[in-house]
Amino acid sequence: MKSELAEKLRANHSILTQYVGVGDGWYHIIDSMLTCIEYEIRHVETNRAWRIKNNQLTDLPEIPQIEFCDIKEKFGTMRVHCTGTNARISGIISMAEAISCYTCEDCGNIGKPRGKNWIRTQCNECFVERELTRD
């Protein structure tokens, strides 16, 4: 990912501190994923505060302390490795990973996994361009 896009992600999402090792086409997937994760964290914090205020202290939800270890491409899809999630955050990450399988990693258009030795999700145009530059 271009450094300016990675910096934009870090500037907009304080929970992201790690290197993002994917193509520019997945920027919007990662941005949306991080927005949803931040919303979930705020939701849990608000729910917890309300329950404490109203003396409902049984089964208080734990505030997720998410820490990203790695965001990379593997076998043509995005892989997100992190700790400190809850079930909803795990679902958000799984959805983002699934969407990446149908999104061109280079430009963000609809794509599909391609390749033999190195699988990469690409649209038709990016695939042809890459094949032409390989020869």
Image: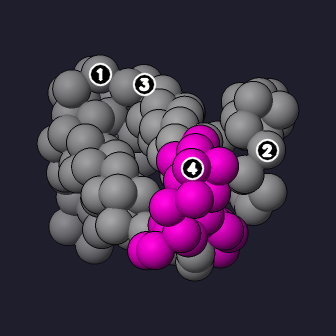
- Numbered badge on residue 90: none
The span from disc 1 to disc 4 (Cα, nearest Å) is 48 Å
Q: Residue at position x 57%, y 49% from top?
A: 54
Q: Earlier in the sequence, mark 1 or mark 2?
A: 2
Q: Nearer the viewer, residue 35 or 108?
A: 35
The segment highlighted magenta reads 46-73
In-front residue for pair 77/11: 11
Q: Badge 2 local density, few (<14 within 10 Å), some, or many (20+)?
A: few
Query: Would residue 36 be counted in the magenta stretch?
Result: no
- Contact between labelled residues 1 and 3, with CB atoms less than 8 Å apart: yes
Q: Earlier in the sequence, mark 2 or mark 3?
A: 2
118 over 45 or under it: above or below: below
Distance from disc 1 to disc 2, alpha carbons, whole Å, reads: 27 Å
Q: Position of residue 111 (x, y in %)?
A: 20, 34
Q: Name the quadrant of the C terminus.
A: top left
Disc 1 is placed on an element classified as loop
Query: Badge 3 is on which residue?
Result: 107
